[in-house]
Image (spheres, rainbow, N blue to C red):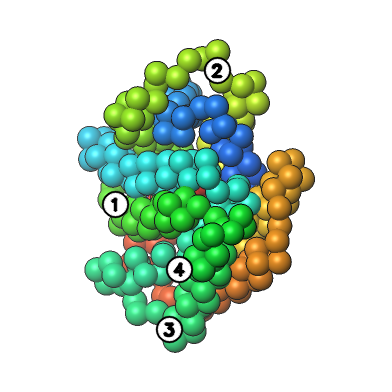
Amino acid sequence: MNAPERKPPTSAFVLAFAAIYLIWGSTYLGIRVAVETIPPFAMASVRFFIAGLLMLLLLRLRGEAWPTRRQWRDSLIVGTCLLLGGNGLVAWAEQYVPSGIAALVIGVQPVFMVMTEWSWRGGQRPSAAVFVGMALGFLGVAYLAAPWETATASSLSMPGLVAILLGCLCWAFGSIYSRHAKPAAPPLVGAAAQMLCGSLSLGVVAACRGEFAVRLNSISSASWWSLAYLIAIGSWVGYSTFVWLMKHSTPARVSTYAYVNPIVAMFLGWLILHEPISPRTTWSAVLIVVAVVIVTTQKNRKRAPLPTEPVEPATLHPSPVRR
């Protein structure tokens, strides 16, 4: 009989949660700066290819097993949903939507998670309170988009907002799929395989759009530094930490990053890029954060653990997106 796995110390959880709170909040700013001179899908493809390849090579040197054929297949599905659908669409949208607003819209991710998990085989119907939370979340996004103000300078890019919401849906599907995929690879190996497979899907889209034809001398130093930050901090530290948390903590607890990321992203966007924070943005933020609190706390209270828990290598929702 295998010995029970030791629970990590409390300090490890504190550091891990602090990492995804702060790092994933800052990656929206990094993406915003990177896509100023690097095409979005090419940028994301390069980011995750370098991060995934170096991580997998390092893990192999440490003696970790190579993913099986089935694990590679699952990594392709999950990586395409999370990194092409979730991250790639957000990177494209941030050409037109401020980084803080993008993070705020992605704050409704738990809503998509609840609906996707409900629609999955064996999923539970959300409570009435969760439906109220989801309604508040969509009201917040609608008020933020302000389609009735399309003729004014304060209106936001509707295609950009739609792309972000579609990215949330892709992230939710990939997350739920990854939780049910068996047998799962070890957490870090799974994260590296997902990044490599996601970079392949992103690269196909970038090639079809002609994004790799960009001249290197046209890329600003700020974009290069942002790309390096996204690789080293956003992917190696942030993404891997999130996958580790999904194995050792509960989805409801991990999803609390959705409370903090928009605040961090909006503050950094205002501080560094001078992105405006209007009263409409503030009230939208209140609605969205309240919605996320309702949905996540209700999930934690009502939802019984799935037979497959503790959760294997998986990703639940951004940073962009996510993260």
Q: Nearer the viewer, mark 2 or mark 3?
A: 2
Label 2, secondary structure: give it: helix
> Residues under labels 2 and 3: Cα distance?
52 Å
- Number of numbered discs overlaid on the protein picture: 4
- Neighbour tally class for label 4: few under 14, some 14-19, many 20 plus, Cα within 10 Å: many
Residue ID for mark 2: 218
Residue 133 location (% of width, % of height): 51, 77
The mark nearer the N terminus, 2 or 1, is 1
Asked if the residues shown at circle 1 and circle 4 are in contact, with their CB atoms under 8 angstroms apart, the answer is no
Look at the image and tell me whether residue 18 can be seen.
no
> Residues under labels 1 and 4: Cα distance?
22 Å
Residue 57 location (% of width, % of height): 43, 22
The structure residue drawn at horizontal position 58% and vertical position 39%, both measured from the top left corner, is 32
Residue 251 location (% of width, % of height): 48, 62
> Residues under labels 1 and 3: Cα distance?
26 Å
Q: Nearer the viewer, mark 1 or mark 4?
A: 4
Label 4, secondary structure: give it: helix
Residue ID for mark 1: 181
Residue ID for mark 4: 111
Label 3, secondary structure: give it: loop
- Amino acid type at circle 1 is Ala
The mark nearer the N terminus, 1 or 4, is 4
Comparing 60 with 42, the one in front is 42
Residue ID for mark 3: 127
Instruction: From this view, report whether residue 96 is shown above or below residue 63.
Output: below
The mark nearer the N terminus, 1 or 3, is 3
Label 1, secondary structure: give it: loop
Q: Nearer the viewer, mark 1 or mark 3?
A: 3
Instruction: Specify whether 159 is left or right of 323.
Output: left
> Residues under labels 4 and 3: Cα distance?
12 Å
